[in-house]
Image (cartoon, rainbow, N blue to C red):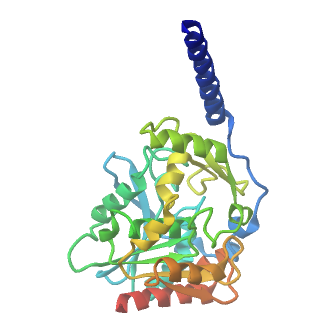
Amino acid sequence: MKRWIRRLTLGLGILIVLVAGAFAAVIAFDSPAAPPVLAAGNSIPGVSQWNFAELPKVQSVKARDGAPLNYRLYPGRADRAVVLVHGSTGSGTEMLKLAQALQVAGATVYAISLRGHGGSGTRNGDVSYRGQLDDDLADLVKGVGIDKQGVHRTLVGFSSGGGFVLRVAGGLQAGLFDNYLAISPYIGPDSPTNKPNSGGWAGVALPRIVALSILDGFGLPWFQGLPAIHFATQAKADDSRTPVYSFRLVASLQLGLDWRAVLARIKAPTRIVVGADDELFNADQFQPMMQTINPCIDVIVVPGQSHLGMIADPAAMSAVATAWLQLMED
C-alpha cells in the first residue's frame, strides 16, 4: 500500500511539473504575431490634407504616480467639458478633426493620450497595473480642473476608446461624468458586434492571455507586462503610435469577459454612434444587442461611413456632434 501511495504521489508530482512547465512555456513564448497591415484600421481617410498647424500644443498633468498624462486643449464653453479618447494604436493627435467639430458645437475638448500612448505614462504600450487607466482618468479630471461644480462633463471615445467609455460608464468611476458617447466602440471578442479579430486589425496571443487571466484569477498579477496584442500596422512604437499592447493595458482598456454585465449597469445617459460600413465591427448588431442588454442606451447608425471615417468625414463628425448636443439636452 505504501508503495502505491509513493507511486501515486510521484506521478502527481510529475504531472504538476509537466503542467506547470507547459503553462510557463505558453506565457513565455506565445507572443502576438503582427497581422498584415489593414488600411481600414491604420489609415485615416484624408489625413494627408489635414492642417496640423491647427493642432494645439501638448499639455500634461501628473498622475498619482507622478507620470505625465498628456492632452491637447480645444477651448469652448467653460461649463461644457468633453474628454475625448482616441482609438487603438493612436494618440490625441488623431482626434484633431473630431475635437474641432465638438469645439464648434460648443464643447471645451480635452483630447487625451491614454497612458502607454502619445507620451503619457512611462512605457509605450503598457501600464503599471490593471485598472490604472481608470485611476488616470480621475487624476486628469481633477488635474485640468473640470471636477468643479457647474461643469457638465462628457466622456467621448472612439473604437477601443469607445469601449473604454462604456467600461467607465458601467464601472466604479461612472460618477466622474454626466453622460457618455461611444463612437464605433469595441465591445468584446464574443460580442455579435465584433468581426473575427476585429476585421483583421488585431493579432492576439490568445493562449498567453488565457494563462495570464488564470494567474490573475488566483490573485497573481505575474508577467502582465508581456505583449498580448499586435495591431495590423507597420508603425513603430513612438509618441504617435502604439502598435503592441501588454496584457495589463488590454485589461485596463476593455470591458472584459463580463461585458454584458458592464453594459447592463450603465445608468447615465449614453449613446453609441457607428458607421454603417464599418470594416471592423458589425454595425447592424449594435441596436439589437443593446435592446436586449440595456435598451436605455441609444444607438445611431450613420449611413455610408467607414470605421476611421467616423473621426475624419464631415458628415460623420456632424452626426457625433449632434449626438453630443442631444445628450446635453437629456
In the rendered image, the vertical position of residue 241 relative to residue 320, given as above or below: above
Taking the spot 33% from the left edge, 73% from the top edge, the residue there is 177
Measured from the top left, where is residue 189 in percent x and y?
62, 62
Q: How many marks?
A: 0
Taking the spot 56% from the left edge, 84% from the top edge, the residue there is 317
Locate the C terminus by quadrant: bottom left
| Relative depth, front residue between 294 and 315 | 294
Inspect this view and state whether residue 165 appears: no
Taking the spot 47% from the left edge, 58% from the top edge, the residue there is 114
In the rendered image, the vertical position of residue 96 relative to residue 287, given as above or below: above
Q: Is residue 240 left or right of residue 69?
A: right
Measured from the top left, where is residue 196 in percent x and y?
72, 64
In the rendered image, the vertical position of residue 325 relative to residue 197, given as above or below: below
| Relative depth, front residue between 50 and 22 | 22
**Quadrant location of residue 325?**
bottom left
Q: Is residue 32 left or right of residue 82?
A: right
Taking the spot 27% from the left edge, 68% from the top edge, the residue there is 145
| Relative depth, front residue between 282 and 51 | 282
| Relative depth, front residue between 137 and 180 | 180
